[in-house]
Image (cartoon, grey):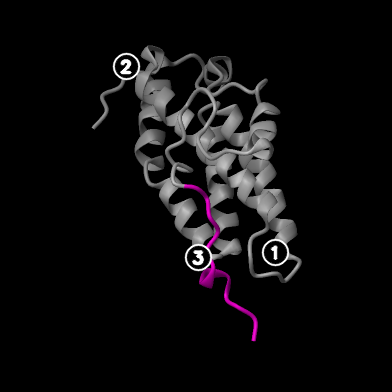
Amino acid sequence: APTPAHANPPDLGPSAAAAPAAGPSQGWGAAEAALYGSFGDREVISMAQMHSIYSGNTQLMANSAAMYLRMTEKVPGQLLDTAQAGDAARLRTLVHQCKGSAGYIGAERVHAVAMGLQHALEGHLGTGEAALPEGILVQLRVLLRCLAELMERLRTDTALSGAKRG
């Protein structure tokens, strides 16, 4: 009988969800570094894109950033738990939601990484394989780092701190 995917959960590393926002990440290999580097031209948050989305309304931008931060706090843990459970279909749904919500605040890097991971998961779902392949886990580790960067930026960016955060 095949081994269930959750019987041998993938090793995403102890710091996958809490990877530092800058500099090399502990436990990252060449694949993660190369993939992360390929998104270097994407902004963590594109203020120009946010201005366009919200017609320059800085209060609305700040409110949206604060709401995104509140709603995204648990996403890294959900992504990790779902990957470790081997639930590729649920992981694809979470990544799709992550991609969509990132687009609403101009989070170019998270949006781009999530789009690639979503496509990889869709391809994987068609294979019938239970275990998540290493390539998908690499992309997930990069997405987790990009989410950590984004969340840190949302917490500290003075241009986005006009809204009360509760």
Residue 97 falls inside the magenta stretch:
no
**Residue 129 visible in image:** yes
Q: Residue at x 38, y 46 (%)?
A: 74
Checking the image for residue 15, the label placed there is: none
Label 1 CA crowd tier, 10 Å (few <14, some 14–19, many 20+): some
Please state which of residues 154 and 86 is positioned toward the viewer in this rendering: 86
Label 3 CA crowd tier, 10 Å (few <14, some 14–19, many 20+): many
Q: Position of residue 134 (x, y in %)?
A: 66, 53
Q: Earlier in the sequence, mark 1 or mark 2?
A: 1
What's drawn in magenta, residue-wise?
1-13
- Find residue 164 and report its image quarter: top left
Q: What is the spatial separation of the Cα atoms under label 1 and label 3, in whole angstroms?
A: 15 Å
Q: Secondary structure at mark 2?
A: loop
Relative vertical location of residue 6 with respect to residue 41 in this rendering, above or below: below
Q: Earlier in the sequence, mark 1 or mark 3?
A: 3
Q: Give the number of marks.
A: 3
Q: Which quadrant: the N terminus?
A: bottom right
Q: What is the spatial separation of the Cα atoms under label 1 and label 2, in whole angstroms?
A: 42 Å
Relative vertical location of residue 13 with respect to residue 48 in this rendering, above or below: below
Q: Amino acid at mark 1?
A: Leu
**Residue 100 visible in image:** no
Q: Position of residue 155 (x, y in %)?
A: 35, 24
Q: What residue is pinned by disc 2?
A: 162
Label 2 CA crowd tier, 10 Å (few <14, some 14–19, many 20+): some
Q: What residue is pinned by disc 1?
A: 125
Q: Residue at x 56, y 43 (%)?
A: 141
Q: Amino acid at mark 3?
A: Ala
Checking the image for residue 85, the label placed there is: 3
Q: Which quadrant: the C terminus?
A: top left
Q: Position of residue 145 (x, y in %)?
A: 51, 35
